[in-house]
Amino acid sequence: IFIFSSLLFLNFNLSFNLKKIMIIVDNLLITYHKFNKIFWSESVWLPPNTTWDTYRNRENGVNYAQFNDLYYSIITAFFFLCVRYVLEKYLFTPCGIYLGIRQTKPKSNSFQNSNQKATFYKIFKTNGKIDNKELKGLSKKFDIDERKLSRWLRWKKFQKKHTLLSKFTESAWRCTFYLFAFSYGLWALFDKPWTYDSIFCFLNYPHHSVSDEIWWYYNFELGFYLSLIISQFFDVHRKDFWQMFIHHIITVCLLCFSWACNFHRVGTLVLIIHDFADIPLEGSKMTNYLKKPQLANVIFTFFTFCWIYSRIGLLPYRVIIYSTYYGLSCIEMFPAYYIFNSLLIALQILHIIWTWLILKIAYNAIFKDGLKDLRESDESSLSSVDEESNEDN
């Protein structure tokens, strides 16, 4: 009787909990559908006299962009992460080593006694940074030369940083992608009318058909920027980390919104203008990591002209001025258009900030200490660790 009553009680509780869970799930689904309906409101995202059925049914014989196609870019992002891993490990790393880039970080020879080393590791882990007063006290306490402790402190700091080889492989991967993307973009847009006159991005909008080459162009560009958002947390950390993160987020939002609103013609122009200057940018970094200052200066000078011409010249002249002025005579305004245009302007503001940084780097390269990425930490301290270690050896 006890066992039977216990089973009935458990069964009742289980059924009761399942009913509660089902009610919660149903409420969540109802809330999601309501939010989805409000968020994707046709009055927000589409121009007047257009519905989502217009896109789905492909009226007027037009092959409209389908928002669900963007989900394929998530697969492409993970594909790019895998391709990057393979290329960096089996191609770019051997090339960097062959060209003379150091593969490993400097070794520490500051401690002879393992107990002293373990104790200092523990203190460093607990306190983090150690000032000069603590350094002198530890030097006397453990009878270790203060200079060795100071050198070990710098060594410990740089152990957390990326080596020149990892920076070289990162730039090599990006340079390879940008070269491929720009070449593909030239091929895909060569016969498109909006490549030569931006007004075609707005004429007869939104009835713009998407060709296969444009579909793939969007797919791997969006996949690449999604992969950058993931890999940025593991790549070399620079001073403009959050600016770059915001840049990637804005770019992804622009790609998604432009695809959803069938503004893919504007999107392709933004993409090819971006990729143009990124090729010499990564090339100048690679030559700088290879300790080829003259070649790095030449490539960086070429990059500076490409950047100013494309980001400060072409983008406002061929895209932003049309989206804010000339295009308004061709289309009827709707709320999503303001979102899309605001993102374009935000992107341009970031370009102006980076242009100022680039001009500072160019000034230093010409009049001061040569080409140096102001976003990165100084490598001289790391070099001094190597030199002092070699003297001790």
Image: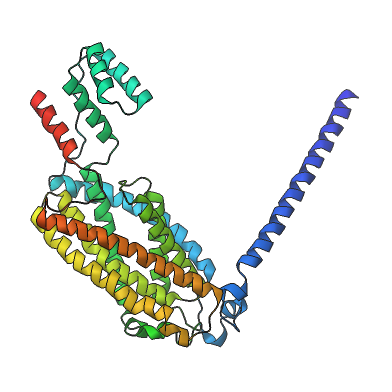
Above or below, 219 against 20 in this view is: below
Q: Is residue 67 visible?
A: yes
Please name the residue shown 17% across and 18% down the image: 145
The answer to which quarter of the image holds residue 97 is top left
Above or below, 290 against 123 in this view is: below
Please name the residue shown 29% across and 75% down the image: 314
Please name the residue shown 60% across and 68% down the image: 40
Residue 234: percent from the left, percent from the top?
Answer: 36, 45
**Which quadrant is the N terminus positioned in?**
top right
Q: Is residue 29 left or right of residue 86?
A: right
Q: Is residue 176 visible?
A: no
Residue 251: percent from the left, percent from the top?
Answer: 41, 63
Above or below, 347 against 167 in this view is: below
Above or below, 240 against 359 in this view is: above
Q: Nearer the viewer, residue 293 or 145?
A: 145
Residue 228: percent from the left, percent from the top?
Answer: 37, 54
Please name the residue shown 26% across and 69% down the image: 276
